[in-house]
Amino acid sequence: MSDRSSIEWTEATWNPTTGCDRVSAGCDHCYALSLAKRLKAMGSVKYQNDGDPRTSGPGFALTLHPEALAVPYGWKSPRTVFVNSMSDLFHARVPLDYVRRVFAVIADTPQHTYQVLTKRARRLRLVAEHLEWPANLWMGVSVETARELPRVDDLRLVPAAVRFLSCEPLLGPLDGLVLRGIDWAIIGGESGPGARPMCEEWACDIVDRCRRSGTAPFVKQLGSCWDKTHHKDISRFPAGLQVREYPRARDGVPV
């Protein structure tokens, strides 16, 4: 797979692990699980291990790829990198020592900015004190419904230079969301087969909360239930949702 990304909020992807298991409603229509199945059928070496069919699928077993740790050293120009678009670095089956090796590569390539996103916020919080946190690492958690709000509390305790939320797919209102200590919030609806709708009001509420807290809002898409053709076209979004901002410097750390 190419390391270049079509994801609106990043420039490249890097997968030192692949595979995962469903843990919450946001995983129900996981694009990575479907892609892994196709890549397995195509013979891709990284996607030959099958996961538990109850929580994972063909080609999607959690798998470490130590050879991929060398990849960032070969990038000639600085870039923003989404780490593990096809996995979760804080999955229980990723050894802490391997997480440390990933963090070491990040620290050793400060010309790049790395974005790590997890749904396993509790493990993130528990191991955070055992990791060295590079200044070029942004740490985020997924929050799809109010049920996942405790993940935000876990993230707040992590000493990352930038803390961010991925509210995508946004499947319900995030009543009670507190953005203290959170630098960035990505907001998006669901697209693809079986997509569930996102109410415009839910997204507007998050943007409003961002404005009150100084958090940068980034509305990625409104979901194919809103408009199958134009759900990613920001020029067609309602005026209050035409925002794609990035986090500012915090505590003297440039971002």
Image (cartoon, helix red, strand yellow):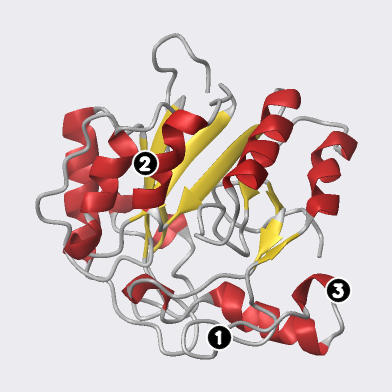
Residue, x 40% and y 56% (percent of image)? Answer: 120
**Left or right, residue 3 beside residue 229:** right
Residue, x 23% and y 42% (percent of image)? Answer: 153
| Foreground of the two, 89 or 167 | 89
Are dots 1 and 3 in contact, CB under 8 Å?
A: no
Figure quadrant of residue 214:
top left
**Left or right, residue 100 beside residue 44:** left
Looking at the picture, how far across and down is residue 132, in whole percent?
56, 25
Figure quadrant of residue 94:
bottom right
Q: Secondary structure at mark 3?
A: helix
Residue, x 80% and y 52% (percent of image)? Answer: 66
Q: Is residue 126 visible?
A: yes
Looking at the picture, how far across and down is residue 18, in whole percent?
67, 65
Tell me if mark 3 has few (under 14), some (14-19) or many (20+) residues whose alpha carbon lies within 10 angstroms of its own: few
Question: Which numbered tag is attached to residue 52?
Answer: 1
How far apart marks 2 and 3 lie (CA) works out to 32 Å
Q: Amino acid at mark 2?
A: Arg
In primary-sequence order, the first of circles 1 and 3 is: 3
Can you say whether 251 is above or below 182 in the image?
Answer: above
Question: Which numbered tag is attached to residue 125?
Answer: 2
Q: Secondary structure at mark 2?
A: helix
Residue annotated with mark 3 = 45
**Left or right, residue 208 beside residue 176:** right
How far apart marks 1 and 2 lie (CA) works out to 26 Å
